[in-house]
Amino acid sequence: MHFITGGAFNGKRKWVKKEYNRNQEKQWLSAYNGFPLPFTIPENHLVEVVLEGIEVWVKELTMRYDADRCREIWNGCLEAWISWEKERAERKLIVIGTDITKGIVPVKEENRLWRDVTGWAYQDVAAKSDKVDVIWYGLNQTIK
């Protein structure tokens, strides 16, 4: 699994498209386009799957559950995604999330919860990823 994060509108999508410009077709599942949180990845999905906008999926979880339950659900998804990727050597999972954890702490409790759970979710995905890149201004820095 490859985790890509960075600020909003800093070129994460463009970088991923350039970095993974291979002959393999990609299945691009984006929360920004209304795609729901994929609890699993179906067996028939292509070799490369990109999950984009994970902070949106985390926000949806925080609107329904407390922080502990959100993390439990999130880690269940991570395990299912990793299992899908490891079933075949040619499979690759690319996870993109916008960093919302910097800056001023939100005033509203629900936004603080979202920010906190997103930070924990990013720690979880980074820990379980084979590679982690941060994209700022279109430039990557590999941190794992």
Image (spheres, rainbow, N blue to C red):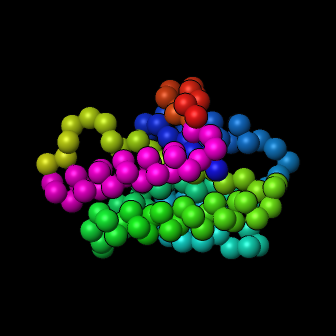
Please give the name of the residue rendered at 30% of the width and 72% of the height, measured from the top-left corner: 65
49 or 70: which is nearer to us? 70
Question: Is residue 14 something one can see in this rendering?
Answer: no
Please give the name of the residue rendered at 56% of the width and 27% of the height, measured from the top-left corner: 141
In this rendering, the answer to whether 9 lies above or below 136 is below
- Outermost residue toward the front? 127
- Number of numbered discs present? 0
Q: Is residue 6 left or right of residue 116?
A: right
Q: Position of residue 30 (x, y in %)?
A: 55, 59
Q: Position of residue 124 (x, y in %)?
A: 46, 51
Please give the name of the residue rendered at 29% of the width and 51% of the height, measured from the top-left corner: 116
Name the quadrant of the C terminus.
Answer: top right
Which quadrant of the view contains residue 132?
top right
Q: Is residue 86 left or right of residue 54?
A: right
Q: Is residue 117 magenta?
A: yes
Q: Position of residue 135 (x, y in %)?
A: 53, 32
Q: Is residue 37 left or right of residue 102?
A: right
In this rendering, the answer to whether 10 lies above or below 54 is above
Q: Is residue 95 magenta?
A: no
Please give the name of the residue rendered at 45% of the width and 64% of the height, measured from the top-left corner: 74
Q: Position of residue 81 (x, y in %)?
A: 61, 63
Question: Is residue 51 something one can see in this rendering?
Answer: yes
**Secondary structure, magenta segment, majority class:** helix
Which quadrant of the view contains residue 100?
top left
In this rendering, the answer to whether 31 lies above or below 12 is below
- Outermost residue toward the left? 107
Q: Where are the magenta residues, as a range?
A: 108-132
84 or 44: which is nearer to us? 84
